Image: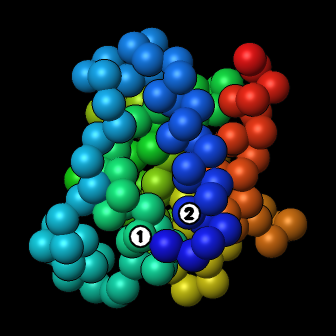
Amino acid sequence: MSNDVGAAWDRVESWLRLHLPACLPAGAVPPGASDELIAEAETRLGFDLPADLRRLWRRCGGPVGPLTPEGEVLLGVRQALDAYDLLNHPDVWETTWIPFTADEPDDPFAGTFIDAVTGLTGSWNRQDFSHLYDDGSTLTGYLTEAAEEQSAVD
């Protein structure tokens, strides 16, 4: 994991652990996704996952959260693929956009995605679909902002 993404995730994970069991019903951050599951996802999608997302999922296979005060949950690989299938409509969803958070992992309405080509992030919802953020936001930025929001709530 890049140092920036790794450091940001460390902050998020530390906050989650401090707020157990409210944030982590099972009492721990879920284990990372296996290399086999990640390879299966890449085969199903037909392209490689962004390196930072792959590395994050190897550390935490999700779902876990909330990551933000708004309640976004880090999706696991399988939940992300299910959300991808739900959102993948021509003319409104780029095939390289991979959802990585959602308001509800099993019945998502809104969340955040990463573009596998550019590494930029954006928001999505099932009503208005999606858009890339125009400020150059990345997975590192998302996790850093989540950690800062978590700290502000304390």
Kindly tell me whether residue 77 is visible in this rendering: no
Question: Dots 2 and 1: beta carbons under 8 Å?
Answer: yes
Task: Tell me if 19 is positioned left or right of 11 in this view.
Answer: left
Q: What residue type is labelled 2?
A: Gly
Disc marking residue 64:
none
What residue is shown with label 1? 55
User: Could you classify mark 2 by the number of other residues whose Cα lies within 10 Å: few (under 14), some (14-19), or many (20 or more)?
Assistant: some
Disc marking residue 6:
2
Q: How did the renderer colour the structure?
A: rainbow
Q: Which amino acid does label 1 sit on?
A: Arg
Give the image location of residue 101, x and y in percent.
Answer: 49, 46
Kindly tell me whether residue 46 is visible in this rendering: yes
Give the image location of residue 135, x and y in percent.
Answer: 86, 66
Of 17 and 70, the residue lying toward us: 17
Give the image location of residue 17, x and y in percent.
Answer: 47, 28
Residue at 47% across / 54% down in the picture? 100
